[in-house]
Image (spheres, grey):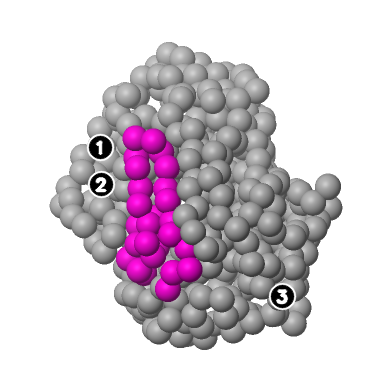
């Protein structure tokens, strides 16, 4: 059902305004939601399927702009990928080391995962030349975090900002294995080095200061890589010169997309939402722990393993949230959910402190600056910290004229805030949701009950 108080207006320049005006009679959120496929797992399935021998079948792929960027890069390098849909995507892999030199610049669009992960592969493809770029946001994001370790392996990469910003040029080489202690807990850094080491003689070891998402490790193992994980040492070892073989991958729903409903259901009175088929890999469930600390009412049902990943249905009821501290080792396990957790904090009783999250400043937008600025416009009491934010909850929000900064997670977080604000909220450049959740607005229209 399309509701007149939630509308998406397309403007002449094709940018979209999301307008939300809660009716005076109030709303609640009710129903059963199927969320789109996990973005991180979708990228990895497309990448490994492309470089494996034989056929890979992917079910439940995220049909968002980010995975499209990954698919188009690999198509340009010779992988045969069928039309993308959620039922079944088939890839005829070209085999490790066989990426074709593309005739044009590869375009990673808005996707940091695409750019950082493929750099490891491009750098290790001997004697081939690649150029790769992205949109305005991606061209401003730091790439030295992957370029430096790749250079230690012998890679040749050039770019702006002393070889740290896209567009980047890569001359592929035979690389040497390394033991790399990453200064940041980043799955993109870890995965880039692991992909680079696939064709490298000997053992490559990556350690990280806190555990980041481990989808690459799980999927590489399933595709046949010789890989061992030591969770206590937070290290992964990959034995190079390996072969990968095509697999069937079932992509679970994305907990980062479920997070919008978990928070919306928690803050809007009378809500009761069942979110089906959510990936609950422990390296991703920080958002559930944070909401539990805030005394949210969320239950896990029907817990099961689907392929390499744990999955559950999540049910959320309205509750009276309390402030909490979100910091330390849990940050990498909820990094993408911090914008919407800030919204939860605005409606929670007392103070919430989010710290140790400097990484948020180098995402699709500076998510600390943007969330503080936009929530302040709605009347929230929120202060910017260098590595996070401090929020005093319980102050009613008012509708406002807001901007997404073309960041998908900012758009959806602000939409959740608008559900509980008085008056009209307009979020400009709301088409950003297409990156990870193209059906977000239509799902919102379905679950909101007047
Ligand atoms: C991702 C890792 C995280 C996350 C991003 C997706 C991945 O980034 O924020 O949305 O798929 O590996 P970092 O590795 O930079 O922390």
Q: Residues within 10 Å of mark 3 (few under 14, many from 20)?
A: few
Disc 2: residue Cβ within 8 A of ligand 1's nearest atom = no
Q: Which residues are magenta?
A: 215-243
Q: How far across and down, in percent of the image, does residue 139 sit?
A: 75, 54
Placement of 104 over or under 270, stated as above or below:
below
Q: Can residue 215 be seen in this snapshot?
A: no
Q: Give the mark, 1 or 2, whose residue is nearer the N terminus.
A: 1
What residue do we see at 55% from left, 44% from top?
A: 180
Q: Secondary structure at mark 1?
A: strand
What residue do we see at 74% from left, 73% from top?
A: 129
The CA span between labels 1 and 2 is 7 Å
Front disc: 3 or 1: 3
What is the number of the mark on residue 298? 1
What is the number of the mark on residue 314? 2
The CA span between labels 3 and 1 is 53 Å
What is the number of the mark on residue 127? 3
Q: How far across and down, in percent of the image, does residue 437 sit?
A: 48, 58
What residue do we see at 36% from left, 19% from top?
A: 322
**Residue toward you, 128 or 241:** 241
Q: Secondary structure at mark 2?
A: strand
Front disc: 3 or 2: 3
Q: Can residue 97 be seen in this snapshot?
A: yes
The CA span between labels 3 and 2 is 49 Å
Placement of 261 over or under 268, stated as above or below:
below
The quarter of the displayed image where residue 291 is located: top left
């Amino acid at each position: 059902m399309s509701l007149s108080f939630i509308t998406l207006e397309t403007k002449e320049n094709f940018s979209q305004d999301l307008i939300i005006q809660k009716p005076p009679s109030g709303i609640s959120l009710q129903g059963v939601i199927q969320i789109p496929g996990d973005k991180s797992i979708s990228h990895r399935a497309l990448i490994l399927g492309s470089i494996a021998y034989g056929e890979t079948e992917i079910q439940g792929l995220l049909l968002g702009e980010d995975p499209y960027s990954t698919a188009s890069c690999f198509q340009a390098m010779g992988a045969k990928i069928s039309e993308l849909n959620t039922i079944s995507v088939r890839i005829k892999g070209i085999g490790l080391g066989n990426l074709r030199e593309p005739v044009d610049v590869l375009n990673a669009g808005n996707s940091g995962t695409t750019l950082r992960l493929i750099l490891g592969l491009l750098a290790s493809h001997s004697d081939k030349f690649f150029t790769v770029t992205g949109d305005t946001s991606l061209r401003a994001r730091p790439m030295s975090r992957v370029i430096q370790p790749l250079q230690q392996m012998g890679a040749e990469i050039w770019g702006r900002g002393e070889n740290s910003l896209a567009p980047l040029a890569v001359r592929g080489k035979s690389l040497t294995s390394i033991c790399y202690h990453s200064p940041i807990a980043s799955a993109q850094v870890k995965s880039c080095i692991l992909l680079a080491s696939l064709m490298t003689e000997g053992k490559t070891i990556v350690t990280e200061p806190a555990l980041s998402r481990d989808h690459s490790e799980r999927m590489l193992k399933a595709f046949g890589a010789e890989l061992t994980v030591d969770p206590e040492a937070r290290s992964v070892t990959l034995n190079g010169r390996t072969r990968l073989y095509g697999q069937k991958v079932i992509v679970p729903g994305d907990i980062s997309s479920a997070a919008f409903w978990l928070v919306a259901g928690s803050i809007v009175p009378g809500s009761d939402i069942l979110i089906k088929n959510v990936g609950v890999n422990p390296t991703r469930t920080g958002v559930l722990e944070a909401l539990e600390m805030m005394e949210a009412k969320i239950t896990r049902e029907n817990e099961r393993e689907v392929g390499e990943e744990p999955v559950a249905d999540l049910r959320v009821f309205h509750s009276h949230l309390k402030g909490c501290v979100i910091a330390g080792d849990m940050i990498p396990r909820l990094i993408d959910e911090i914008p919407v957790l800030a919204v939860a904090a605005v409606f929670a009783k007392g103070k919430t402190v989010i710290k140790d999250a400097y990484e948020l400043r180098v995402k699709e937008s500076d998510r600390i600056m943007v969330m503080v600025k936009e929530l302040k416009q709605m009347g929230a009491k929120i202060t910017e910290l260098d590595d996070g934010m401090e929020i005093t909850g319980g102050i009613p929000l008012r509708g406002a004229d807001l901007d997404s900064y073309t960041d998908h997670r900012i758009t959806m977080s602000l939409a959740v805030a608008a559900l509980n604000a008085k008056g009209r909220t307009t979020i400009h450049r709301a088409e950003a949701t297409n990156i990870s959740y193209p059906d977000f607005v239509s799902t919102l229209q379905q679950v909101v009950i007047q």
